[in-house]
């Protein structure tokens, strides 16, 4: 899981560098902020769920999934709010494109995690 998150981060960094080069800095950093707003909560959830070694009772595993998802949702809401409050200027289209690309890249996880 952490390997996929690392690859997801690298992919969004490369895309944002391309956007920096083609469209300019405003769109590049707006894209990367959008992607990070999705990726950072995913890292938290992965840490909550997969950060333990060894076997655990099923009840504890389910509890860690619920806590991880609740934390991920709360982190996403806070990060979205902070970016819109603190980052000026911000290209909203590029921001949501980065956010959406990071979310859609989760579809790649079965391919990456299979190997």
Image (cartoon, grey):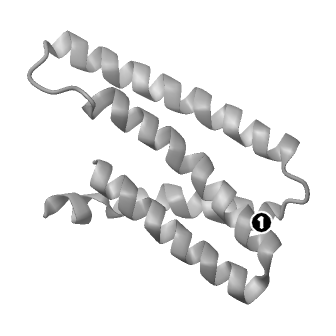
What residue would you read off at disc 1? Answer: 93
Residue 76, percent from left and from top: 61, 37
Question: Which residue is rendered at x = 45% and y = 42% of the image?
Answer: 42
Q: Is 99 placed left or right of 22 in the picture?
A: left
- With respect to residue 46, does 11 lie above or below? below
Residue 86, percent from left and from top: 85, 43
Question: Which residue is rendered at x = 72% and y = 60% of the image?
Answer: 95
At mark 1, the secondary structure is helix
Number of numbered markers: 1
Question: Which residue is rendered at x = 50% and y = 55% of the image?
Answer: 103
Picture quarter containing residue 89?
bottom right
Picture quarter containing residue 100?
bottom right
Q: Is 68 placed left or right of 34 in the picture?
A: left
Residue 71, percent from left and from top: 51, 25
Quick one: 25 or 107, which is closer to the camera?
Answer: 25
Question: Which residue is rendered at x = 77% and y = 38% of the image?
Answer: 82
Quick one: 103 or 75, which is closer to the camera?
Answer: 75
């Amino acid at each position: 899981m952490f390997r996929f998150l690392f690859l997801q981060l690298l992919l969004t960094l490369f895309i944002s560098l391309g956007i920096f080069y083609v469209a300019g800095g405003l769109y590049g950093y707006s894209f990367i902020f959008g992607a990070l707003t999705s990726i950072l909560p995913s890292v938290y959830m992965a840490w909550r769920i997969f950060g333990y070694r060894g076997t655990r009772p099923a009840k504890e595993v389910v509890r860690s999934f619920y806590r991880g998802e609740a934390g991920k949702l709360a982190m996403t809401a806070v990060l979205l709010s902070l970016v819109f409050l603190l980052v000026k200027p911000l290209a909203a289209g590029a921001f949501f494109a980065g956010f959406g690309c990071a979310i859609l890249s989760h579809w790649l996880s079965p391919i990456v995690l299979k190997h």
